[in-house]
Image: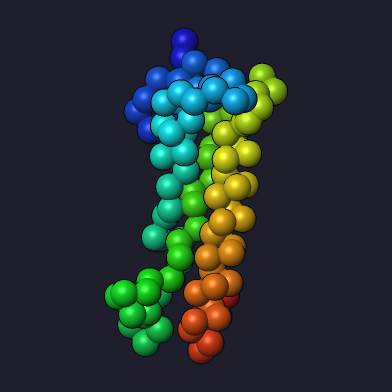
């Protein structure tokens, strides 16, 4: 039986072989979405609407990885998204010096 990620059946990890361009990678990347509930914002610290604070990506469930040694793995995409988020947060904090990284 195939695993299901965000309501989409996935065989293995659902990722294409390295170097190939297929729709599966886009579907997996879409599953690594940002979760606004993970970043607390109070009215006093709410950012301007035109420059919102970056939101971290959702970490895939441990069982989202098929364990087959896929290259890239769904967690590779997540770690790339985390690096991108960290850079976006550093840039945002530089534009908003009164804010904290927490």
Give the percent coordinates (x, y) of residue 72: 63, 30
Q: Which quarter of the figure has residue 45?
A: bottom left
Q: Residue furthest top?
A: 1
- Left/right placement of residue 40 relative to residue 12 reads left
Q: Which quarter of the figure has residue 54?
A: bottom left
Task: Name the residue rendered at 37%, 74% in the picture.
Answer: 51
Give the percent coordinates (x, y) of residue 101: 57, 75
Residue 10 appears in the picture as rendered: yes
Task: Name the residue rendered at 59%, 20% in the picture.
Answer: 17
- Left/right placement of residue 33 relative to residue 87 reads left
Give the percent coordinates (x, y) of residue 50: 31, 74
Establish if 46 lies above or below 60. below
The one of 22 and 79 positioned closer to us in this rendering:
22
Q: Residue furthest left?
A: 49
Q: Which quarter of the image is occupied by the C terminus?
A: bottom right
Q: Residue furthest right?
A: 69
Residue 31 appears in the picture as rendered: no
Task: Name the residue rendered at 57%, 40% in the picture.
Answer: 77
- Left/right placement of residue 8 relative to residue 84 reads left
Q: Is the image coloured rainbow, by chain, by secondary structure, or in one colour?
A: rainbow
Task: Name the residue rendered at 47%, 38% in the picture.
Answer: 29
Establish if 77 lies above or below 43. above
Give the percent coordinates (x, y) of residue 18: 62, 25
The one of 10 and 18 positioned closer to us in this rendering:
18
Total numbered labels placed on residues in the image = 0
The one of 68 and 50 positioned closer to us in this rendering:
50
């Amino acid at each position: 039986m195939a695993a299901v990620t965000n309501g989409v059946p996935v065989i293995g990890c659902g990722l294409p072989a390295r170097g190939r361009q297929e729709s599966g990678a886009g579907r997996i990347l879409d599953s690594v979405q940002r979760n606004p509930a993970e970043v607390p914002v109070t009215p006093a610290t709410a950012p301007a609407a035109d420059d919102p604070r970056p939101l971290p990506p959702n970490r895939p469930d441990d069982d989202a990885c098929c364990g087959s040694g896929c290259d890239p793995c769904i967690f590779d995409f997540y770690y790339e998204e985390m690096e991108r988020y960290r850079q976006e947060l550093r840039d945002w904090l530089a534009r908003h010096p009164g804010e904290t990284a927490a």
